[in-house]
Amino acid sequence: MTVPTTAAGSVAARRTVMSKVGARLLSREAGVAATLILVVVFTTLQNPNFVFSPDGYRDLLLTPSILMLVAVGQAFVIITRNVDLSVGSIVGITAYLTGRLFIDIPGIPVLAVFLAGAIVGGALGLINGALVAVARVPALVITLGTLYIYRGLNVAWVGSDRINASDLPREFRSLGTDQILSIPVLTIVAVLVLIAAAWYLRNTRGGREFYAIGSDPDAADLYGLKVNRRIITAFVMSGALSGLAGVMFAARYGTVSSQAGTGWELQAIGAAVIGGVAISGGVGTVWGAAIGAFLLLTINRALPVIGIQDFWQRAVVGALIIGAIVLDRVLAVRQARKLREMRDTDND
Amino acid sequence: MLELRNVSKTFGSVVALSDGNLVLESGSIHALVGENGAGKSTLVKIIAGLYRRDQGDYLLRGESVDFTSTAQAKNAGIAVIYQEPTLFPDLSVAENIYMGRQPTNRFGRIDRKAMRAEARAIFERLGVRIDPDRVTEGLSIADQQLIEIAKAISLDARVLIMDEPTAALSGNEVARLFAVARSLRDEGRAIMFISHRFDEVFELCDTITVMRDGAYIATTPAHETTIEEMVRMMVGRDVATLFPKVDASIGDVVLHVDGLNRAGVFHDISFSVRAGEIVGLAGLVGAGRSEVARAVFGVDSYDSGSVTLLGRALPAGRPAEAVRRGLAFVPEDRRKQGLVLDSGVARNLTLAVRDSLRRFGLIRTRDENRLTGIWATRLEVKASAMDTVVGTLSGGNQQKVVLGKWLSTEPKVLIIDEPTRGIDVGTKAEVHRLLSDLAGQGLAVLMISSELPEVLGMADRVLVMREGRITAEIDRVDATPENVMFAATQQKEGAR
């Protein structure tokens, strides 16, 4: 935002303090991005193939792009002080759905498949949202239930079947490898979605209400905000973006079994938390969640390259998540103290 | 501007408001006064659209309205500032003011610059300095209230209701708030001010409406009435016959509290309770009564002072020790602090004596039920079975279970906080009879109550607290609703 030109002296003085506070908020995303670059540079120095091989370069951008979509959806939900554990199962269902559509409806346009994935994912998200908002049961419980239900439906539907790359039309398969200006197409799609989501959350009345609701749900009720509608919207977004990710999963890997997307919910939540989305709601951006997704997967891939054992790989990811939360807490305490001091000096 | 006629509201069997009347005029500051539980909050919530009235008329600018949500009331120009401001702590001040109504450009993009400028303009008009860009987290209650007021102004609210806005403010902040309130009045808005501080009521308001027991009592111009008259209207009812405490022989001091302090909560609290005596601890909600009780029992800490139980000092912060030495504490919120709601009557009743009930480390249901049987009979708990889940019992019976739980520890001193809150009249009398019997058997009782009749009827001695201090100690014979209420709200009169 631009700094206003009209400001009284005292206000201007305080503005410098405020801009520092604002810079702190900004720096969260910047900090995660810096860490990401550091990891990439360091690992590449150890093993140049990490970036400078065709596979390495593609993995760097492509694989995280898919998780990124799920993390962006998850951020919507977490910002409203909820959580969506069912996203991994939604990725699985829509990934298989993608293959089935191409097999059962020969010649179906690729765009229609993308739409179908988003719509089916959105519908599954709608079920989550409706249960959370109307039944007033904590999202943790509802989506833990739908995690198993959706996965169960998927297993029942897929059975021991699997989608193979040969089942998919060439033009769809090539989406997983195509590049524009040496950037993978799927990454471009994911980033466009990210930009739209970020713009909506930051710059529209509706977007700001997600933050208000997560910041204090009771106050939002008293204020007369349409809390239920927003919460349902958040879950629909999360579902639809997971559905989109499911379609991209099929394009990227070509093979889809009944276990596709297992465990993604925790990676998505981890990505959001690492990226500065407060698990208690009201704080954070989808940019943070997106960069968090890149950092999480890149570290996962970097650790074996620099020769760290499997056990420690998981521990490092865990430490990263805990570290991010501790950092948030420390910064929050420090900011609260700063604000208190400002108040005390103001009251003199 | 706004008028309520014969409005009523009931929750289940509890009548919260039986006959609410109110006329708010433009350009006037109207005070609404009454004891705790007089129905003021219910009235406000009906005006705000949070509750719907069961009966009566609600007129706004002469037209009948029926709000089903706070958003509707807000759109009709009614703004309510609750005791605890309800803001979004993670969002900026400007965003809190304009949430859902932010100025936007033609693409629907929020115009932050315009929003900030508008917020700043309102603050300038109010004569306060709050940075619209800072997050709301960490602002003082006074500043948060000003943000609420700014919100009301930005909505161009014509009716502004402030529910005890000064309760948490310092002297300067109160003066600033009053200045703002007066300027809003002069702009022709109707303002309603709810307060327990009579000096403030008379300083600020031009009209006063008194409520009592959920009903309208009177409305008078402020200059035609006095504090004394107002207090009489607030409490005026026959109390002596309602809650008779049987005289018991009063023995030695069993609980003695000396100079108890906790910074910002209570100061210099000294009193003693004798065997067979019921000491009432009166005062308004927020006066620090429950905090004192919790500190004495050891749940909360205190900074200085001492507690002596049966002649021996009681260490601070050790509730288990207090129980072992014969102190029992029935907390205010029995559902949260006194009961395991999902467990049965027997489980709950024996909760405090599980150790002595234990044989070889195990508790037999038979023993549990035997003990429960004794107390359930003595207290006349109406439950169909020993394992009836207490959450399903009525408030009165729940209270009896909590009482039974503590009485089974055979205490010497019982501290009971709001013994009859949320209990219907019939069961109330039973609880009172029970307390009276217990005192007759030599139990020392410290009873915290916000209900004046209960205090006056039950207590041998009344201690009154106001803003963290004991402001009066009145004997049963001298206690009147007026002097207790005075001590609870004023410093003069009734103070020793």
Image (cartoon, rainbow, N blue to C red):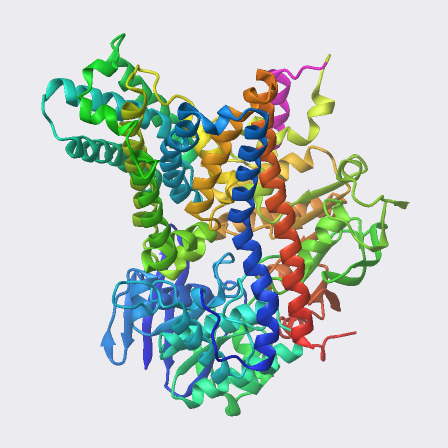
Vertical relation: B178 (above or below) B430: below
* Along the line of sight, the residue nearer the viewer: A90 or A221: A90
Tell me: residue A323, above or below residue A160.
below
The image shows residue B439 at horizontal and vertical percentages of 72, 47
Q: Residue at x 59, y 26 (%)?
A: A46
x then y, percent, for residue A239: 30, 35
Q: Is residue B449 left or right of residue A197?
A: right
Magenta segment's dominant SS is helix
Residue at image position (66%, 63%) is A340
Does residue B28 belong to the magenta stretch?
A: no
Rendering coords of residue B448 (x, y %): 66, 55
Task: Give the residues in magenta.
Answer: B361-375
Q: Decide whether residue B369 is among the magenta residues.
A: yes
**Which of these two is toward me, A94 or B31?**
A94
Q: Is residue B321 left or right of residue A81?
A: right
Which image quarter is the N terminus of chain B in? Answer: bottom left
Q: Is residue B370 visible?
A: yes
